[in-house]
Image: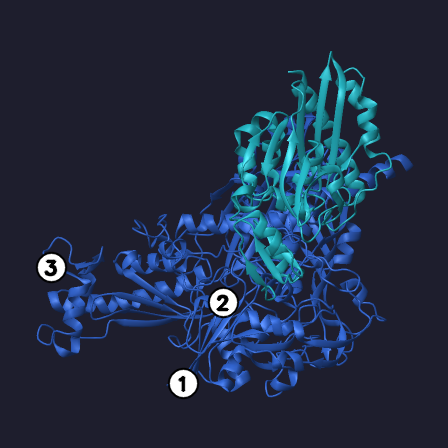
Chain colours: A cyan, B blue
Amino acid sequence: MKPAPFEYVRPDTLDAAVQALNHEDARIIAGGQSLVPMMNFRLVQPERLVDINRIEALTPIVQTDTGVRVGALTRHVEAEYHPLLREHFPIISEAMPYVAHLAIRNRGTIAGSLCHADPSAEWPLLAILLNGEIEILGGSGSRTVPAEEFFMAPLTTDIAETELVTGVFFPSPPASCGMAFDEVSWRAGDFAIVAAGALVYIEKNRFVNVRLVLGGVFDTPIRITALEEALVGQSANQDAIEAVLSLTTKDLEPNDDLHASAEYRLSLVHVLARRVLTCALERASS
Amino acid sequence: MTDAIAYARPKYIGKSIQRLEDSRLLTGRGRYAADFQVPRMAHLAFVRSDQAYARICQIETHDAKELPGVIGIFTASDFAHIPEITAPSKMLNYHPTFCPVLARDFVRYVGEPVVAILAEDRYVGEDAAALIEIEYDPRDVAVTAREASSPNAPKLHDSLGSNTIFSRQFAAGDCVKAISDAVHVVSGQFCMTRKTSVSIEPRAYMAEFEPQKDTLTLHSATNIPGIVRDEIGRLLGLSGNKFRVVTCDVGGSFGGKGSLYPEEIIVCDLALRLERSIKYVADRMEDILSSSQAFEEEVAATLAVDENGHFTALKADILGDIGAYSIYPWTAALEPVQVASFLPGPYRIPHYTATVRGICTPKPPTGPYRGVGRPMAVFALERLVDKAAFTLGLSPTELRRRNLVGTEEFPHRIGSGIIWNRSGFHECLNAAEEAVDLPSIQAEKTSRKDKWVGVGFASYAELTGIGSRIAVAPGMPMNTGAETATIRIDATGAVSAVFAMSSHGQSLETTLAQIVAEELGVLPEDVNVIQGDTSLTPHGTGTYASRSAVIGGGVAVKATRGLLVKVKRVAATLFGVSPSDIQTGDGNIFVPNTNFAINFAEIARLVYSDMSTLPQEARETLEFQATYDPIVGTTTSATHAAVVEIDPETLLIKLRRHFVAEDCGRLINPLVVNGQVHGGVAQGIGAALLEELKFDDAGQPITATLADYLVPTSAEVPDLEVAHIETELPDSPGGFRGMGEGGTIGAPAAIANAVTDALSQLGIEVNSLPITPSKLHALIAAATKQDRQE
């Protein structure tokens, strides 16, 4: 379980990183928590590793007029405890303990998780739920991709080999917004069998906006738009949630794998959707 | 003086002394096989089969040979001089298999070593492995024991008549009549799935070639150094003066390091041929794929009960999936036969019949695994006991109480021939029942809607510290019943205790030191326990089968007492008193109520260095060697009680409490006993709720990493509660019983019973382990469907 030979470079600036990526089969290493095991299994054999850990421009978490920008190198544990994120997006600190184990959260990064795009990972789900915008830099300049369009397939995103993610922008949600996250995994820290996140915005006791995103069920995290739309305009109460819950699992064909049957996953989708919507509603109301 | 009262006022035995090995192991100063670095050491890597069963057509090694840093590439033909590994047995209807150190002509499981690569480092070795191409001609496979046992199944070994490599019958009384006469009969089909050990340290071997003396030392992560020395010596034609095995620190085995492996033979052979030291360290995937596996059995069993709730008969058919080869030295019969041997459990069951078959399948060989057969036996029987209790409308504890062998009934021979001696069968059950408080759980079951709560019990007995009358494995022509030890005081007064067996986590450095210190009258930290070096002892096998407390502890008592006689004789001469006047303690040798006193350092000087104080004939060497063989063994017993709660929506199963009442005789060190019980229960939790090696229809393992093979972590293990019941002590030196495996033996059954109890309102039974939320979901769906149909 040793990696194939590779070249290692460690640029100090974004420009140098972009330059270094302009090379046959180059891969970025940040926290290395998914990449290194894959290299040791020789599932990936990059010619060159570009270590971005020394690039200071990738680290800050800053507030803007419209939201919070999180640098690509932000470690999971930093995101969990950062005051700005705790204030504006408490769901992040609620979800972070589900990301593997503490030692992994100390090293793994937000951009690493987004770019790895594991279908059961928490960050892709959160990015879609929170309407995040992924900032990407490449040889021909920078671009921004909405999180919802970023994830294309398991372990596949809308990013070229010569590009890198520099950060994620999370727009501020309205004040009367409640959010909740829940997940079922076999053991503490395991990949999610099903994960669910909900964001509920109410005004005058009615649902104004609802987002429900599921992870671990399908090739990428998915929004349940039918349910979201059905709730908007309804009275903000538990009955309304119960009335639309069946929309969650309608037409959904969850993955069937080694760890859980599709039928079991479907039952979990129902349970977790109810739990996160109920909890988000309570938080929005209080 | 009988041992039952030997330690009326013990100083060290029974005390929770901090482990003497901890400061070394916890500060990273332990020395494991992988830590050895010597000049010119080369590294071994393997290309392993990616086919379950196939003929090897061609192996292309040219590109790999050319790679800089590659020393040599070896295939089966390079080891033609080494006989195949084969495990003999005197058991009737047993057919040994023949396993070459590298696959020859055929591969028979994914993970079987096919090509060995010797390189300057492991990185180059794996680069070379990637360049080797093996062409296979796949054969049809029968992956499960059930399929492979069919007469038309493809045969895994052409030389054998069928895939059934052993079969055996047990019969006592007239089971057929007893079952047909019975008022109540309960039956079930029980199965457990394959497990792997997952030691923190994977298997690792370093063969150190010493050119000065032309000798070879194998530093091996094994728990059977003596067996490895003897058999590699036989296979390579080496005797003990040229070859020794040293275990150093070993990071767990759980059975997985308790057999002879091809890789350790290859490192030795190549080290001798190339005259350089060679290291092989398995990576985690290799360890999962190629270390011995276990527990894959199906048991169809029937229990008959009379109108008073007394068991009358037990009948079982046991099918063991033993994998591709019969492992050395235990044979593939070890585990399945043990299921049959222990199935009647701690109960009075007059009529017993069982058939056992071991079936070859294209999967890794099975071998010892903590509990060996008894986790399956206890799971099957204790599920039947709960079913019977339910049928009779009795509480599970009451039915057990009516059938457990009574205190006055020992010794009691069970239907398989095993004899139970006095042990706390009833005392453990009573303690568990009291700890759990059944009425309060019953009340919670009815009042709580947000959780399904259940409680389960499992009572069992096991034979530990097995002596020479019984082979640890059926028909195994090897004495595993004796251990030899030497205790000596050197010229500085230091005490050394040399044992052939070795610890791979059992804390023997501490517990054996406690025993020697207690018997000799010194401090435990003054005793240097030396273990696991075959050059220091004439014979010994290792640590397995819960034997080291009984046999190792026993020989420690015996040898130290022999040494004490010498010490007292010297002191008596010195003081001019009778040896019976001499006492020892805290490092001093003295005559009570006098000023005759001397310490061990002084007496050593008088004996070895001083030529004037003592007469020459009194200056005897302060050393004593003894061998101990318990002949039969000791009966350890326990009752486990598990309380689970299940989330009715997510079906997640939480083990809320796990209580163990066990009788292991006299505790040498309660900390160590608790540690063993805790670790064993954790492993049992894995077997009950998480761990499962899965293979697809082609025999490909699909759980080859720790992301897919799930072992319990601290988050899945509750605070474990352990009560030690000390009834009448066994007739062994010190009064110790073995207890290294019990946690794993009792926990799966107790948890299965608890989950079944929690689901009683749905009429669902847990008869296959591990039980997971996804499997529960399927069981509930099936039960609901059946309800609707009815």
- Which residue is identified by label 3? B596
Q: Name the residue under label 2.
A: B221
Q: Read off the residue under disc 1.
A: B211
Tell me the element at label 1. loop
Residue A226 vertical position relative to residue B136 in the rendered view, above or below: above
**Residue type pointed to by label 1:** Pro
What residue is shown at x 45% (from left), y 57% (from top)?
B506
Distance CA(mark 3)–CA(mark 1): 53 Å
The chain holding disc 2 is B
Q: Which of marks 3 and 1 is nearer the N terminus?
A: 1
Q: Do the residues labelled 3 and 2 touch (CB within 8 Å)?
A: no
Quarter of the image where the C terminus of chain B is located: top right
Amino acid identity at mark 2:
Ala
SS under mark 2: loop
Q: Label 1: chain? A: B
- Tell me, for residue B728, which label it has, or none: none
Considering only vertical position in the picture, is A116 above or below B698?
A: above
What is the x, y in percent for residue B194? 68, 58
| Element marked by disc 3 | loop
**Foreground residue among B446 and B5:** B446
Quarter of image, res B211 = bottom left
Give the class, few, some or many, for how many residues have Cα within 10 Å of label 1's Cα (few <14, many ≥20): few
The chain to which mark 3 is attached is: B
> Disc 1 versus disc 2: distance between alpha carbons?
23 Å
* First-in-chain label (3 vs 2): 2
